[in-house]
Image (spheres, helix red, strand yellow):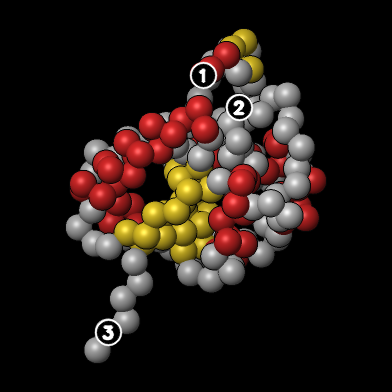
Amino acid sequence: MTTFEPMRVFIGFDSREDVAVNVLTHSIQLHASKPVQIAQVRQSQLKGVYTRPRHPLQSTDFSFSRFLVPWMCDYTGWALFIDADMLCLGDLSELWSLRDDRYAVQVVQHQHSCQAGRKFQGEPQTPYARKNWSSVILFNCSRCRMLAPELVNTASGLYLHQMSWL
């Protein structure tokens, strides 16, 4: 008998995007060829753990709480975090099969050029290096022990999103 571990997927939740979360969930399940466990990263379920006050440059409720995914997985196995405003057009098992134990995280590295100003829901748009790399993160949870609630609650947004903690 072989051991089977489903893909663990965490979707960021912001009440302004509740429809988007459901669309993403549906699109993941629609294309999945293997079982997927989907959970939402909701601040209301992290009370007492996620204590960070909302920052004026924070676009969504999950801007920083996404980095608690390894903690939520008890720092074991692999987990995928996805921003709520995504749409899955293929089988996530293809992405899941790219997991590489040499890395703590795997992201899509790209050059994103944006202008300072406003974006989604009138939130501030802030250009910075590695912009949007944290929109989809494949976490090797055992190698992300530094992402404890204490760090996630206190580290700067740039420190977290630019993966300086690695």
Q: Is residue 107 visible?
A: no
Is label 1 or label 3 in front?
1
Is 150 positioned to the left or the right of 63 in the image? right
Q: Single out the residue that lies furthest toward the bottom.
A: 1
Contact (CB < 8 A) between labels 2 and 1?
yes
Name the residue that disc number 1 marks: 120
Rendered location of residue 83, percent (x, y) = 47, 38
* CA distance separating discs 1 and 3: 45 Å
Q: Residue at x 54, y 65 (%)?
A: 73
Which three-letter amino acid code belongs to the residue tagged 2?
A: Ser
Name the residue that disc number 2 marks: 59
Q: Secondary structure at mark 1?
A: helix
Which three-letter amino acid code belongs to the residue tagged 3?
A: Thr
Q: Secondary structure at mark 2?
A: loop
Nearer the N terminus, badge 3 or badge 2? 3
* CA distance separating discs 2 and 1: 8 Å
Query: Can you tell which quarter of the image residue 148 is in?
Result: bottom right
Callout 3 crowding tier (Cα within 10 Å): few <14, some 14–19, many ≥20: few
Rendered location of residue 145, percent (x, y) = 66, 64
Against 79, is 57 above or below?
above
Q: Residue at x 40, y 38 (%)?
A: 21
Name the residue that disc number 3 marks: 2
Nearer the N terminus, badge 2 or badge 1? 2
Q: Secondary structure at mark 3?
A: loop
Is 96 positioned to the left or the right of 143 in the image? left
Rendered location of residue 146, percent (x, y) = 70, 60
Figure label count = 3
